[in-house]
Image (cartoon, grey):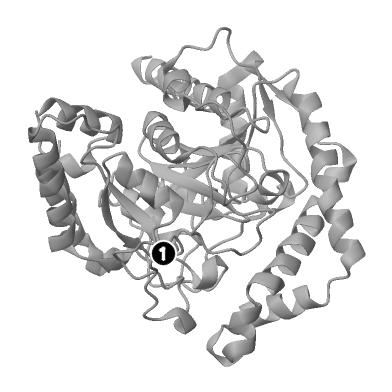
């Protein structure tokens, strides 16, 4: 197997034992970028020589006998709204062209401490909202990769990087991961600190990860999770041990709830058919469950919070030169500027109310199963697709993961989204790994028959 396509857990183990050098692993990624970047356009900033220089330094570190970190020598792509002291961070915005941060974001500093190679800066949409960048979907170059973490999802899908960092304020991790056919994990809000990451709507902004497997996603999240005094959403807690728990067998067969959500009418026919088949495969292990009536308003409350906070945090861009922003972004900022304080505060109050409703579901079920997107990646590059199936879960701050378990009739990925109780990230990852194995075993049995 090409080293660039090897999973992060396996690659880290191979490098730690000396079976593979960090330089070899990074060189394989560099070669893959050289082969596919012209078509895919995953990176905003990429420096092959600098990536290899980092890897050689890590090899010297290991050769000295000094202990190595859990990601020693593993290349990671970073979304270009996450500050890096050694690369520009331009936020997908013309007004930030040439911006060079003085310091790394906290998560980048933690990646370096874990031994990761910072491979490059992955393309983001404009200020991580809706206006696309240059990236194409590696699974079908005439289709969107999703957004706003477009380049991060595409880099992992194309084998350019085993791991990537993204963010989600609506559907910006789950949707592109589903469209590109990779694992996308959005932890509970507050698990990963956001200090040094572009602020769009802090009540919703969440750092997430892209990977080739559930275990790889758990490893990366373990390395960057934890309290940071600069981010009030984080709390001092014990390490999450996501990888350890994800590897465990569930103590009992997980019980799943199939939730269509209030936007089920937006699902394509092929999505409805695929999920009907999945529910049939899971049999007695999954029940149809309806969300309580207040969830019908969750999309409206999410919009109120997102646009009001966006208006605040993007005010400097708007006031400096709104003509350099897209018309759609200007419209969203202007809508946010008209939000009444009462409407904003009421919308925030509903986050806890809705989580109380979800807690009742999670008393009986290990995870919710729902689509990651209305369908496969849409054709064309002028849109990043519809985030509607992600909105409720982002608003509530609960963990979600998309799994590339289903395909459309023409072979394009259809993501299966699993959602867990807020703060119960490890259990969600364990259930996700179990579900992959259960569906694979069922599929293998059908082929054998």
Q: Quadrant of residue 328?
A: bottom right
**Left or right position of 32 against 409:** left
Quadrant of the drawing holding the C terminus: top left
Is residue 348 left or right of 411 when viewed as pictured?
right
Looking at the picture, tell me which residue is in the foreground, 61 or 265.
Answer: 61
Residue appearing at x 46%, y 53% in the figure: 166
Quadrant position of residue 104: bottom left
- Residue 102 to residue 71: above or below: below
Q: What is the secondary structure assignment of the residue under circle 1? A: loop
Is residue 180 something one can see in this rendering? no
Along the line of sight, the residue nearer the viewer: 407 or 24: 24
Q: Which residue is mark 1?
A: 80
Total number of numbered labels?
A: 1
Q: Which residue sits furthest top? A: 251
Where residue 165 sits in the image (x, y, percent)?
41, 50
Quadrant of the image containing the N terminus: top left
Residue 77 x, y percent position in the rendering: 33, 53
Residue depicted at x 52% and y 49%: 207
Residue 198 visible (yes or no):
yes
């Amino acid at each position: 197997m090409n080293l660039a396509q090897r999973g992060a857990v396996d690659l880290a183990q191979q490098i730690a034992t000396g079976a593979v050098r960090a330089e070899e692993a990074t060189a394989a990624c560099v070669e893959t970028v050289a082969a596919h970047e012209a078509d895919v356009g995953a990176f905003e900033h990429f420096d092959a020589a600098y990536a290899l220089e980092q890897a050689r330094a890590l090899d010297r570190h290991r050769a000295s006998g000094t202990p190595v970190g859990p990601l020693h020598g593993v290349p990671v792509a970073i979304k270009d709204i996450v500050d890096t002291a050694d690369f520009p961070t331009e936020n997908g915005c013309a007004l930030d062209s040439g911006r060079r941060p003085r310091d790394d974001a906290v998560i980048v500093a933690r990646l370096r401490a874990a031994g990761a190679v910072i491979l490059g800066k992955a393309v983001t949409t404009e200020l991580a909202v809706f206006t696309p960048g240059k990236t194409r979907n590696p699974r079908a170059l005439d289709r969107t990769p999703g957004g706003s973490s477009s380049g991060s999802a595409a880099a992992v899908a194309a084998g350019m990087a085993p791991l990537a960092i993204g963010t989600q304020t609506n559907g910006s991790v789950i949707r592109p991961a589903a469209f590109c056919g990779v694992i996308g994990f959005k932890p509970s809000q507050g698990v990963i600190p956001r200090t040094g990451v572009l602020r769009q709507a802090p009540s919703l902004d969440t750092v997430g990860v892209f990977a080739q497997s559930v275990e790889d996603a758990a490893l990366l999240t373990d390395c960057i999770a934890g309290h940071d005094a600069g981010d009030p959403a984080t709390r001092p807690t014990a390490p999450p041990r996501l990888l350890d728990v994800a590897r465990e067998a569930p103590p009992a067969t997980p019980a799943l709830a199939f939730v269509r959500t209030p936007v089920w009418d937006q699902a394509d026919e092929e999505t409805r058919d695929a999920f009907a088949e999945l529910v049939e495969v899971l049999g007695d292990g999954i029940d149809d469950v309806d969300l309580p009536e207040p969830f019908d308003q969750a999309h409206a409350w999410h919009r109120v919070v997102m646009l009001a906070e966006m208006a605040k945090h993007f005010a400097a861009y708007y006031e400096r030169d709104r003509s350099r922003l897209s018309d759609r972004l200007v419209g969203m900022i202007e809508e946010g500027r008209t939000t009444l304080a009462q409407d904003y505060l009421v919308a925030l109050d509903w986050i806890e109310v809705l989580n109380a409703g979800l807690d009742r579901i999670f008393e009986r079920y290990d995870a919710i199963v729902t689509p990651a997107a209305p369908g496969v990646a849409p054709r064309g590059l002028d849109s990043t697709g519809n985030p509607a199936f992600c909105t409720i879960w982002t608003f509530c701050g609960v963990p979600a993961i998309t799994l590339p378990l289903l395909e459309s009739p023409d072979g394009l990925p259809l993501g299966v989204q699993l959602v867990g109780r807020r703060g119960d990230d490890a259990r969600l990852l364990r259930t996700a790994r179990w579900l992959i194995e259960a569906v694979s075993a069922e599929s293998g049995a059908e082929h054998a028959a």
